[in-house]
Image: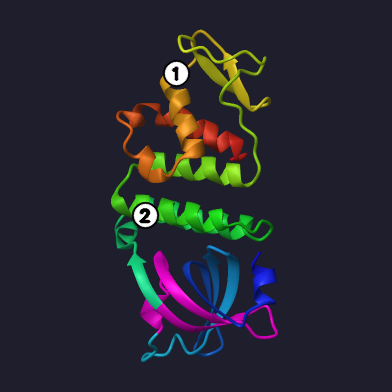
Amino acid sequence: MLMSMQNDLKDLKTRALILRRTNYGESDRILNLITPVGKVSAMAKGVRKEKSKLAGKIEMFTLTEVNLHFGKSNLATLTGAKMVKFYANILKDFERLELGADFLKKINQVSENIETSEHFEILNQSLAALDDGLDTKIVNTWFLFNLARVMGEQVNLYTDINGNKLDVGSKYVWDVNEKGLRLFNNGEIDANAIKIMRLMWTTDCDVIKRIKNIEVYMPEILRIAKAINNL
């Protein structure tokens, strides 16, 4: 998607989140950016100089509106930047900082092979939720469910591994090998947990945070989300 656009335009103005920054030369930085049109690598010239106008606008955990110029190489040039939102609260808590950094790393990795606008949306919603103080287990679970969905994982949350329709009064466990729910009388997954997982898979993070008593179900659902992502 992005490569085809580069063939048609020389300049692009878009929202972006910084996935990684690498110092280059005496005063430059190479930025890995995730945008609604895909991943972009860009050179920020002179950004490490004391009087650089771009420096404070391309910090980590910052939603930024960037201006990019594309030349003959795959490395764009950052020609302008305007801060839209700084997720400053993430930096105030080590657990949130560590989880946010892990989100950046995962998106940086998966966006190498798959170009989709959803990578940007998943990351931005996850960082916003961390910044707002939403429970880290909830944010991590939503992030992992949606990352798996975008990566093409097929998760059946409507029938069990034998093809039987899930029953409201029954309980289940997650079968790692079959990647599905297996009927089990003493299972920890009930109808409420299944509803939450369906919402995790299909709705925005803003919807998830409105669910009452969701924290009760998080340990088991997070374990499932990690299993789906082979973590």
Gap in angstroms between the C-alphas marked 1 and 2: 29 Å
User: What residue sits right under mark 1 in the picture?
Assistant: 191
Mark 1 crowd level (few <14, some 14–19, many ≥20, 10 Å Cα): some
Location of residue 92 (image quadrant): bottom left
Is residue 165 shown above or below 62?
above
Give yes or no for contact between labels 1 and 2 (Cβ–Cβ under 8 Å). no
Q: Which quadrant, please, contains the N terminus?
A: bottom right
| Residue 138 visible in image | yes
Mark 2 crowd level (few <14, some 14–19, many ≥20, 10 Å Cα): many
| Residue 215 pos. (x, y %) | 34, 31
| Residue 225 pos. (x, y %) | 53, 36
Q: Is residue 20 magenta?
A: no
Which residue is located at x 58 percent, y 34 percent?
227
Q: Which residue appears farthest toward the front when viewing the image? A: 8
Give the structural element (helix, strand or loop) at label 2: helix
Q: Nearer the viewer, residue 152 or 101?
A: 152
Point out the tag, 1 or 2, that comes first from the N-terminus.
Answer: 2
